[in-house]
Image: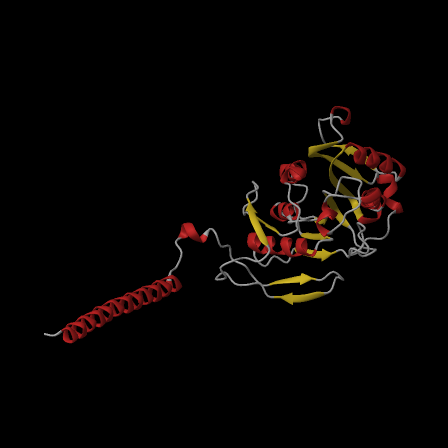
Amino acid sequence: MDDTDLVTAQMDLRFWAAGLWGAGMGLGFIRAFAFSSVALLAVGCFEPSSSEETLVKPVTSQTLLDDEGQSGPVLIPSATTPSLPGIVRWESVPPLSHDVAIMETVFWESADTDSLRTQIFSSTDIKGRRVLEIGTGSGLVSLCCLQAGASHVVATDVNPNAIHNVRFNTVEAFGDDKRLEARLVPRRSPGAWTVIKPDERFDFIISNPPWENSKPKNVEEFALYDPEFLLLDSLVVGARQRLRSGGRMWLAYGCVTAIRRIEMLACSEDLRYIQLDDRTLDELPEVFLPGMLLELSVPPAAESDSVPESR
């Protein structure tokens, strides 16, 4: 074999080896692709176990009010949807029978309403009664009233997400319960009675309103700040016209200045004022938790001054 034949043989051998290497790489790629495809098909067919299902709660179709108080259908994804838009977490609040969903921009601090919830469940006062909750948030207090047997609950809030939130939590806990009615308060007129009819009256009016005298900068801060205590003033001044005979208003406040203002306004409006708490204002800081439970009611002699009751 001469030198030319030797070089040709070496080149043929190199091309042959390169061909084997390329074929091996191609086969490896095909195997990897096939494995990935099978894995994806397996994931698509996979059904979560009961322990994994706790990560996904069932969602139903709701009706959400827009900022002007108009209703319109909003379709919420079904239980098979991998994520739940708007829900940031779930909270367990005994003795409620179901966990509470908390949605984006909705205020949550369960300690604010400890005294309110204890009052609701420690007596039979709510059973069969018509209730108004002002500033519902996630709907925690309204849910307590429904579980305690209220005949009808009107829940109001200035945050559209809160209206969505209370409706969702009601369906989660009680199904399609017609006892709950959620109403959106327009931000341009955020008073206590904006979405309440002039002749509409209630056995109980309940609120855990914002405590601090400051101006909210966005919809979330309406749950924290009450500029010049305008909401507080409207709550107390309008109480007599909104309560049925023998009705009561329960307020949870954790601000000493706000509570002293309520006491002063109750006196000027000829309302009976009771502090349902063993603590005294002198021993508390300006802002504190849990909030103090206050009860306002119309003295029997003053009930004749109220507007006629809506039936």
Q: Nearer the viewer, residue 28 or 166?
A: 28
**Residue under the point 49% across and 59% down:** 82
Residue 260: x and y in percent read 82, 33
Place residue 171 in its image quadrant.
bottom right
Residue 37: x and y in percent read 35, 67
**Residue 46 falls left or right of residue 27:** right
Numbered circles on residues, count: 0
Query: How is the protein colored in the picture?
Result: secondary structure
In the depicted structure, whether residue 300 falls above or below residue 202:
above
State the residue lying farthest toward the left: 1
In the depicted structure, whether residue 244 falls above or below residue 21:
above
Place residue 91 in its image quadrant.
top right
**Residue 268 falls left or right of residue 247:** right
Residue 113: x and y in percent read 67, 39
**Residue 146 falls left or right of residue 68:** left
Which image quadrant: the C terminus? bottom right
Q: Nearer the viewer, residue 120 or 34?
A: 34
In the depicted structure, whether residue 204 falls above or below residue 179:
above
Residue 3: x and y in percent read 15, 73
